[in-house]
Image (tube, helix red, strand yellow):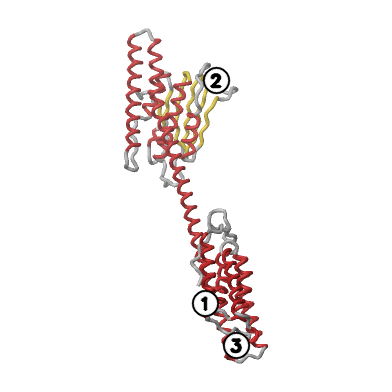
Amino acid sequence: MPSAPVPGRPAGSPGVDLDAPERPALNRRDLLIAAGYAALVVLLGASGASNSGFLGEELRWSPSVSIAMMLIACVSLVWRRRNPAITLAVAGPLAAAEVLVGGQISAYILLFEALFDPIMHGSRRLARLTTGLAIGAGVVAFLIAVALGAAGPILLVVLMISALVLMTPLMWGWEVRHHRDARLVAETLTDVEHELAATRAAQAVETERRTIAHDLHDVIAGHLSAVSLHTSLASSLEQREARDRSLATARDSAHAALRDLRSMIGVLSTEETGTLPSITLTWPSLTTRLRGRDPEARVEIDPAATDAARVEPSVQAALLRLAAEASTNAVRHGLAPISLSVRVGADAVTLELLNRRAETAVPGTGVGRGAIAHRATAVGGSATSGPAPEDGPEAGMWRVLAHLPARTAAAPVEASTTSTTVNQEALP
């Protein structure tokens, strides 16, 4: 009986063809298996267990010749895994000849191995060739028996032996091969799923990292810009009251930045899902931030921008963060006059911020403009930021223009009301 198959790493891993398994290297086990079969041949030969063969006693060769043939067949079993074609080409004919002529019992075992190994360890092409040869040999044996005028019982014996000796290793080999290939395919799919899960996890971490970076930039950077602006302004003011107001504004901005930073750190350190930071970012706070740079800044916010029936909450959040980023850039790099307007239409929200460009602006990192575009595209909108056309009425100005959908594709559509725009000069 054949031993349990131990194939090398065959096809099944990504990028490897199941029809062309890798050839494992010869090892000590292969030698021990061949030696075990050789010992079995010698033992059965010495015991005298044999039959007369199928061609009669007249054509039967001596036991020593039978044993020598079977030992040569055993040597070919060394390559049963590495190159099963050798086993088929050597052990197959020798065992078949011994079954027909010599009658050694070990020939049946070696013939089984010669047919089983190519199907189990060989390529699919070799397995099919082995199957065809075995079936062909069985058919030829039956036809020869019919041509020689064998009686009905003899023909039945020929069929039974063909079924047992030839068909059994074929069916067993293909069954084991199919189970092995199915296992390898399942392992491959598992590996691919693990790789996809790792990729998704890495993408989720990268997305979260970018979100945290944008939140820090949108919320904290604005407060720190106000601190920097007002502390610099206070050092240049001669009137004590004006200087105290600037320092008070810088202090309030620093406190707000610290409060927001603690809130975000608290969210990052908690294990509860769905927790959102409590931040001080509001439209009035943005107005205060802009008027810290330009006391005459014009801010017009459509009240519908904060109405969930008109603008989806996720769009409201993106709009506020986008405005915060644009305001931070205007405070850090721009000059008066500054204007901010938010208008809500039937299906879209438009944000526009204008400020005069400074002649000697400090070079930025480019994170702000990227954050503006990211916030807009995240909800299905678009945003541009850059110098206004030189030949237009806004020449010399820096403009941020964003168009966002009032509701995302997944949000339910609700009846809209008429939009009115008010001037928010009374905001603090």
Are discs 2 and 3 less than 8 Å apart at CB? no
Residue at 42% in and 39% down: 208
Are discs 2 and 1 less than 8 Å apart at CB? no
Mark sitting earlier along the chain (3/1):
1
Q: CA distance from mark 2 to mark 1?
A: 104 Å
Element marked by disc 2: loop
Q: CA distance from mark 3 to mark 1?
A: 28 Å
Residue wearing tag 1: 44
Q: Is residue 266 above or below residue 55?
A: above
Front: mark 2 or 1? 1
Residue at 46% in and 27% down: 326
Residue 196: x percent and y percent?
A: 48, 49
Amino acid on which disc 2 is placed: Gly
Q: CA distance from mark 2 to mark 3?
A: 105 Å
Residue wearing tag 2: 396
Assess disc 1: are there few (<14), some (14-19) or many (≥20) residues with their C-alpha within 10 Å of its C-alpha: some
Residue 155 bears which disc, if any?
A: 3
Amino acid on which disc 3 is placed: Leu
Front: mark 2 or 3? 3
Q: Is residue 184 left or right of residue 158?
A: left
Amino acid on which disc 1 is placed: Leu
Mark sitting earlier along the chain (2/1):
1
Q: Which one is nearer the viewer's eye here, 375 or 160?
A: 160
Front: mark 3 or 1? 1
Residue at 43% in and 18% down: 294
Q: Which one is nearer the viewer's eye here, 67 or 123?
A: 67
Residue 280 bears which disc, if any?
A: none
Element marked by disc 3: helix
Mark sitting earlier along the chain (2/3):
3
Assess disc 3: are there few (<14), some (14-19) or many (≥20) residues with their C-alpha within 10 Å of its C-alpha: some
Residue 30: x percent and y percent?
A: 53, 62
Give the image quarter of residue 22. Answer: bottom right
